[in-house]
Image (spheres, helix red, strand yellow):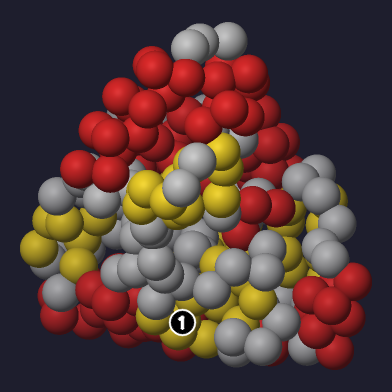
């Protein structure tokens, strides 16, 4: 939200001159806005952290979530793995699993699983979204409309009591909505930093979710909304 130059200098162990110089650069990049004595965040609801950045934060939490989510997968399952840093941790825990069919719009996840001999990997066609390396567009949507999966492991940009599930990018959202239509069970995998956050585009209400796997219990308001929607919360 808001932070002062003095606080940043103390917390980071550098001079206020260094902080002011760095904040000037961040302001030029559009990340912050300078105010008297400090800065405020300039990131609105449409700001999407890069996949590289998301992969480097909350690492331990995502690993625990990925391990717990993968434990739900049974031999013989047909599953869909959404794009994202947390769903990629699910994929890491499916290496050397047997007799699975995995469909994913993520080229990074596909690369993780491509050489597994007892796993059938399906990558939909479409347009590759730069940075995310996700497949988007009509071809990707149509592919998920013809696959009926046992479980969908869904990543989201935000989970909110009133707004439900939200995402930053419209193209990715359309693919997520196509995946939701044909999934027997929907499992959202999201660390607690996504709680009480609203991103730009609505994916779906909370009642489409069967399970939420996360690292900490949600806030009381969100926990009540999840309970009312019939969502089972699993804390890894």
Quarter of the image for the N terminus: give it. Answer: bottom right
Q: Report the residue that reaches farthest toward the front.
A: 36
Instruction: Give SS at disc 1.
Output: strand
- Residue 97: image quadrant is top right
Image check: 226 left or right of 186? right
Quarter of the image for the C terminus: give it. Answer: top right
- Depth check: 120 or 224 in front? 224
Look at the image and tell me whether residue 163 can be seen: yes
Look at the image and tell me whether residue 63 can be seen: no
Query: Dot 1, how many residues are within 10 Å of its Cα: few (below 14), some (14-19), or many (20+)?
Result: many
Q: Position of residue 66 (x, y in %)?
A: 63, 41
- Residue 163: image quadrant is bottom right
Residue placed at 45% from the left, 84% from the top? 202
Q: Position of residue 189 (x, y in %)?
A: 62, 56
Residue placed at 42% from the left, 70% from the top? 45
Q: Is residue 175 above or below residue 65?
A: below
- Residue 122: image quadrant is bottom left
- Depth check: 70 or 155 in front? 155
Q: Is residue 187 above or below residue 42?
A: below
Residue placed at 58% from the left, 27% from the top? 6
- Depth check: 52 or 95 in front? 52
Q: Is residue 147 above or below residue 190?
A: below
Residue placed at 70% from the left, 53% from the top? 192
Q: Position of residue 42 (x, y in %)?
A: 38, 57
Task: Please name the residue that numbered disc 1 is placed on.
Answer: 203
């Amino acid at each position: 939200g808001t932070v002062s130059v003095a606080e940043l200098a103390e917390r980071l162990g550098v001079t206020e001159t260094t902080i002011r110089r760095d904040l000037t650069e961040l302001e030029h990049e559009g990340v912050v806005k300078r105010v008297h004595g400090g800065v405020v965040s300039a990131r609105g609801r449409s700001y999407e952290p890069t996949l590289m950045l998301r992969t480097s934060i909350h690492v331990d939490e995502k690993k625990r979530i990925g391990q717990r989510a993968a434990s739900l997968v049974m031999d013989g399952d047909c599953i869909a793995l959404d794009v994202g840093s947390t769903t990629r941790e699910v994929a890491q825990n499916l290496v050397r699993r047997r007799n699975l069919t995995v469909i994913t719009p993520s080229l990074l996840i596909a690369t993780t699983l491509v050489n597994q001999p007892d796993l059938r990997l399906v990558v939909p066609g479409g347009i590759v979204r730069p940075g995310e390396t996700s497949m988007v567009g009509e071809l990707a949507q149509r592919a998920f409309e013809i696959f009926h999966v046992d479980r969908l492991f869904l990543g989201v940009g935000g989970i909110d009591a009133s707004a439900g599930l939200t995402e930053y990018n419209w193209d990715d959202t359309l693919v997520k909505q196509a995946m939701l239509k044909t999934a027997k069970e929907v499992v959202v995998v999201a660390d607690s930093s996504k709680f009480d956050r609203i991103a730009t585009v609505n994916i779906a209400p909370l009642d489409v979710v069967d399970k939420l796997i996360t690292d900490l219990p949600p806030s009381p308001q969100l926990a009540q909304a999840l309970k009312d929607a019939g969502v089972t919360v699993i804390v890894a």
